[in-house]
Image (spheres, grey):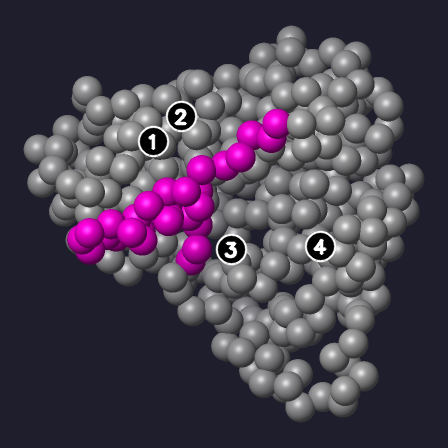
Amino acid sequence: MEYETPLFFHVMEYASRADRDVVDMVSGNPDWEPPAALRDGLREYADLEPDRFQYPPSQGLVELREEIAARRGVDAEQIVITNGAGEANYLAMARALERGRGEEILLTDPVYPYYPGKTTMLGGTPAYVEAAADGQLDPAAVREAASDETAAIVVNSPNNPTGAVYPEETVRELVAIAEACDAILVSDEVYDHYDLSGTFSSALAVESAHRIVTNAFSKSMAITGFRVGYAIFPPELVDDAKSRHMLVNVAGNRPGQYAVLQALRETGPGYYERNRDLLRERVTTFTDALDAAGAAYTRPDGSFYVMARFEGYPGTLENVERLIDEAGVAGMPGEAFGDSRSEWLRFALVTPRLEEAAERLAAYFA
């Protein structure tokens, strides 16, 4: 079987071998501090008894699942703690395909590249609905594309790579479409704490047996290396998801779950608001530089990515490597996210050197 392998690590490795200084704007690794309570939780964990260094419950620490359940308004038994949002999406897509209603996974274009890779790995067939220029998704286009062969509709809001945030009406329509064709809506909400527009709506607001919500603490707590995520399943789909999780992973990261639990309990809303304010400032700084370079760009309503199009400089891997070598800025090729953004480049606003990178791009393309 041939998988669609994402290009992130290829670009990062190329940048690391460059014969010059390079500003990394490739992957979404937040450069800001995690919650103080998370560091405290790790220190506390180090002094626990040896039995706490053994396997946790496979589906995740009971206390963490209960904390998430209370915050999300669901039963703790519906939650599986996963190896980041990546595994959460894998489990959700697997359960959708295992229902036997079809083999098609309906994705958006542009798309987060790991979704089509997971689709082919699971034996599904990817199909695409093109998003609007601003990244918004037209439910009518999704409804037209969906069929009896559609096992799942996978969406991401706030969106990577476009920065679009789907309004409540769109989310409700997507759930209704999944119900109408007996499919599963997989709603990846990993950037929910980076809604810069105030319009984010979770699919959990819609009661349905046809939606699975995935999330993680990787972005919200700036801990992508901890790999603590979760999926919320309808009751009738959760047991087999727990079994697959156990067979693939046995269990998850116990110290990480413990520290995340402490951080959830002790971190107030101010932490997340400060990070959103930082992102707003970075969006302005970066897009001002793109204006100076004469580029077209998307201004994100959420997440922390900007897509830019420079005249005569399509978003190919070759041009990304050229930009690393000649300008000292590493981004992602638009072609990695689908056909509709092949003329674009994507930049992650998660570096303290963002202003320097913006100046380099402005000088290079001016």
Instruction: Give the mark nearer the N terminus: 2 vs 1.
Output: 1
Q: x, y percentage for residue 294? A: 15, 29
Query: What residue type is disc 3 on?
Result: Lys
Residue at image point 63% right, 21% down: 126
The local crowd at label 2, few if under 14, some if 14 to 19, many if 20 or more residues have their Cα within 10 Å, is some
Q: Which is the main secondary structure of the residues drawn in magenta? A: loop
Q: Secondary structure at mark 1?
A: helix
Residue underneath mark 2: 335
Distance from Cα at disc 3 to Cα at disc 4 = 15 Å
Q: Which mark is residue 219?
A: 3
Report, in whole angstroms, how far the alpha carbon at label 2 lies from the one at label 1.
Answer: 8 Å
Name the residue carrying label 4: 82
Residue in the picture at 31% in, 22% down: 343
Q: Residues within 10 Å of mark 4 (few under 14, many from 20)?
A: many
Q: Which residue is mark 1?
A: 317
What's under tag 1, amino acid-wise?
Answer: Leu
* Front position in the image: 90 or 183: 90
Tell me which segment is drawn in magenta. 2-30
The mark nearer the N terminus, 3 or 4, is 4
Amino acid at dot 4: Thr
